[in-house]
Amino acid sequence: MTEHIVHFHCQIDQSTTERFRDCCLEAIEQGASSLLLNLSTTGGSTNFGFSLYTFLKSLPVPLCAINAGNIESMGIIMYLAAGRRITAPHSRFLIHPMNWYFNQSSVDHQRLREYLSSLDNDLARYVKIYQIETADAATQLDIFKCLSAEEKVIAAHESLAYGIAHEMKQMIFAEDVKHWKVGGS
């Protein structure tokens, strides 16, 4: 069994998503029978976060994700795509209300309705994925409240009860493992 490690320590945007996808696919092409995703991200684009989740779920090899420091916002959706999830002892997770950044100087009613509909849809998708991936949790988190009203900082040990992580431990990588790296632009 050949495990490859993909390090992703950056925001989720188009560039980092494409580089991450390429690293994962190249690792599989080079014979990886499983991927260890070493993650630390402040999150980022909902569009690319949901795309990463779907991409990771489609891969033909087992995935293990590690919270190497902080997994925030859309990074949690990326993290939840792995079948096995580990959190480092001093890491944390952050879930906060969703928001939208406006680039235009002028926005009409129709565009505002489109943005609101998109934001509501992103909220519903996030809630559904979270509920599916943490269904066996000992403690159910009111994820809708966290995404719409009140942020939640979750310590590593708390993430176990919420079903976000499956185990807490300090990882030590094997010396002979292949490493792939994705960083910010």
Image: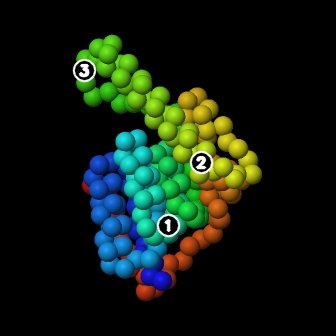
Residue 83: % across, % down = 55, 62
Say which label, 2 or 1, has the lower sequence index: 1
Q: Residue at x 45, y 35 (%)?
A: 122
- Outermost residue toward the left? 105
Cα separation between marks 2 and 1: 17 Å
* Residue depicted at 42% across the width and 46% down the height: 50
Q: Amino acid at mark 2?
A: Ile
Q: Earlier in the sequence, mark 3 or mark 2?
A: 3
Residue sitting farthest toward the top? 109
Q: Are marks 3 and 2 in contact (CB under 8 Å)?
A: no
- Residue visible at 59% across and 51% down in the picture: 133
Q: Position of residue 55 (x, y in %)?
A: 39, 56
Q: Is residue 178 left or right of residue 169?
A: left
Please determine whether, in this image, residue 131 is positioned above or below residue 157. Answer: above
Q: Residues within 10 Å of mark 1 (few under 14, many from 20)?
A: many
Mark 2 or 1, which is nearer the eye?
2
Point out the tag, 1 or 3, that comes first from the N-terminus. Answer: 1
Mark 1 residue type: Leu
**Residue 165 locus on image (x, y percent):** 62, 58
Residue pictured at 33% horizontal, 48% vertical = 13
Q: Which residue was labeled with disc 1? A: 63
